[in-house]
Image (tube, rainbow, N blue to C red):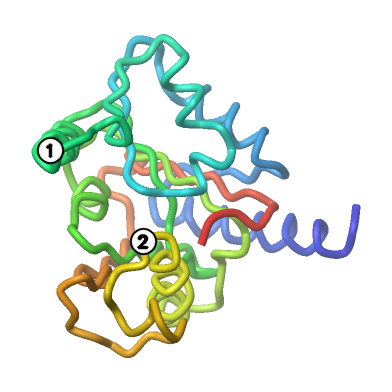
Amino acid sequence: MTPRELFYEKRGETVVKNLQGRGFEACYCKTGEEARKKALEWMKEGASVSWGGSMTIRDIGLTKSVCEGNYKAIDRDQAVTDEEKRKAAMDALTVDYYLTSANGISEDGQLVNVDGNGNRVAAIVFGPQYVIVVAGMNKVVKTAEDAMVRARTVAAPLNQQRFLKSTPCTVTGVCADCKSPDCICNQLLTTRNCKPAGRIKVILVGEELGY
């Protein structure tokens, strides 16, 4: 193993224990492929499954596996009109399993997310029976405050390079704490503990994934 792989594994094991201490079901996987298989192990066949805009779950092939498997997939990516997208987002709030990532994770086991429309953080907080979070070790930082800083100054500006909306960070790559109509930092969520215990399941991956 490389020094980075060893570092990620040892740090990941520490974060997993801290997540478990907060009521999350959590595990560490060395690769995205292992994470994909673990997520599928957690989901019962025939269950309803949906997701938000996470690139991580797409990059590891998890959404493709769901669409091709024996699941009732609510795939917002297939929606064409704004009305269809809204309906898919609303239907996602009542699924058996909701797939997402995190914008930041603190070493002591807290999840931090920022959202533009709020559908993703809404699903994390309440609605779906289970939430499965897949996050690369690049998302792990020291404190919950650091995780919020990462979400605002790294994840959000990076994501805006996908959307290319009219915000300062789209132009400069730097958060300006803006109030733009196209801002994607409208809802800020810190999940300190998982209640009920085990509802949110976290897979840490020893790779750099997503934003």
Q: Residue at x 48, y 78 (%)?
A: 143
Left or right placement of residue 163 versus residue 108 in this view:
left
* Labelled pair 2, 1 in contact (Cβ < 8 Å): no
**Which three-letter amino acid code belongs to the residue tagged 2?**
Phe
Q: Residue at x 9, y 38 (%)?
A: 83
Q: How many marks?
A: 2
Residue matched to label 2: 163
Q: Give the farthest residue toward the bottom.
A: 176
Q: Relative to the observer, which residue lies in front, 168 or 53?
A: 168
**Occupied quadrant, residue 166:** bottom left
Q: Give the farthest residue toward the right.
A: 1
Mark 2 or mark 1, earlier in chain: 1
Q: Residue at x 49, y 41 (%)?
A: 57
Where is residue 146 drawn, in percent x and y?
47, 81
* Element carrying mark 2: helix
**Which three-letter amino acid code belongs to the residue tagged 1?**
Met
Left or right placement of residue 26 versus residue 14 in this view:
left
Residue 125 disc label: none
Q: Relative to the observer, which residue lies in front, 142 or 48?
A: 48
In this view, 37 is above or below 83: above
Where is residue 39 drawn, in percent x and y?
51, 31
Where is residue 144 drawn, in percent x and y?
42, 75
Q: Relative to the observer, which residue lies in front, 48 or 27?
A: 48
Residue density around tag 2, few if under 14, some if 14–19, many if 20 or more, within 10 Å: few
Residue density around tag 1, few if under 14, some if 14–19, many if 20 or more, within 10 Å: few
Residue 90 disc label: 1
Q: Given this view, does label 2 or label 1 mark the residue nearer the observer?
A: 2
**Occupied quadrant, residue 111:** bottom left
* Element carrying mark 1: helix
**Occupied quadrant, residue 156:** bottom left
Q: CA distance from mark 2 to mark 1?
A: 22 Å
In this view, 80 is above or below 207: above
